[in-house]
Amino acid sequence: QLRLVESGGDLVQVGSSLRLSCVASGSSLEDYVIGWFRRVQEDPRVAVSCVGARDGSTKYADAVKGRFAISRDNANNTVYLQMNNLKLEDTSTYYCAALALGTVQAVCAGKFDYWGLGTQVAVFS
């Protein structure tokens, strides 16, 4: 059983940066593909970025390309989402999700085995 806990959310001004963390416990993260999602209007799970388990492959939503960067530290069972040049529309609850032995395409399409409770990001002007 994998448990995911997100942290790093905050209230920040437009143009600021934040780094979100997704820490896993209960199992090693190295066999899981991880995705970051956020709530957008009525859709609770819009993919932001996903990272492969061992090959380091990544996928980004068009809205965050060039501003966000996903990375993982398997030794510390943690996946990060570095968010730069934050915009008002980045305000949301951010969740991480894990899929065992999957692909970044599958996770970003909403297929996952485990899901965290989220961390709040609020951007103001």
Image (cartoon, helix red, strand yellow):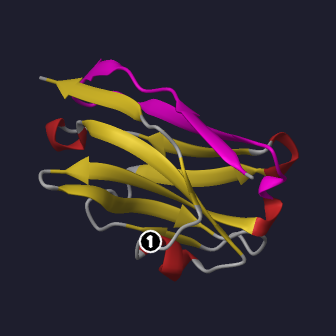
- Would residue 47 be visible to someone looking at this image? yes
Disc 1 crowd rating (10 Å Cα; few below 14, some 14-19, many 20+) is: many
Q: What residue does disc 1 label? A: 108
Side (left or right) of 110 relative to 35 = left
What amino acid does circle 1 point to?
A: Cys
In terms of depth relative to the viewer, which is nearer, 29 or 27? 27
Looking at the picture, tell me which residue is in the foreground, 79 or 115: 115
Residue at the image point whose x is 51% and y is 35% from the top: 20
Residue 65 appears in the picture as rendered: no
Q: Nearer the viewer, residue 27 or 75?
A: 27
Most distant residue in the front direction: 1
Report whether 89 appears left or right of 50: left
Picture quadrant of residue 47: bottom left
Q: Secondary structure at mark 1?
A: helix
Residue lying furthest right in this view? 75
Residue at left 80%, top 44%?
Answer: 26
Above or below, 112 against 118 in this view is below
Where residue 4 appears, x then y in whole percent? 62, 43
Give, as a single range, the part of the protein colored magenta. Answer: 2-29
- Residue at 60%, 44% (x, y): give it: 80
For the C terminus, the image quarter is top left
Judge left or right: residue 97 versus residue 79. Answer: left
The percent position of residue 56, horizontal first and vertical second, equals 70, 69
Residue 89 inside the magenta-drawn segment: no
- Estimate the x, y position of residue 97 in percent, counting from the top left: 54, 56
Give how far across and how far down residue 111 sits, in percent.
Answer: 48, 74
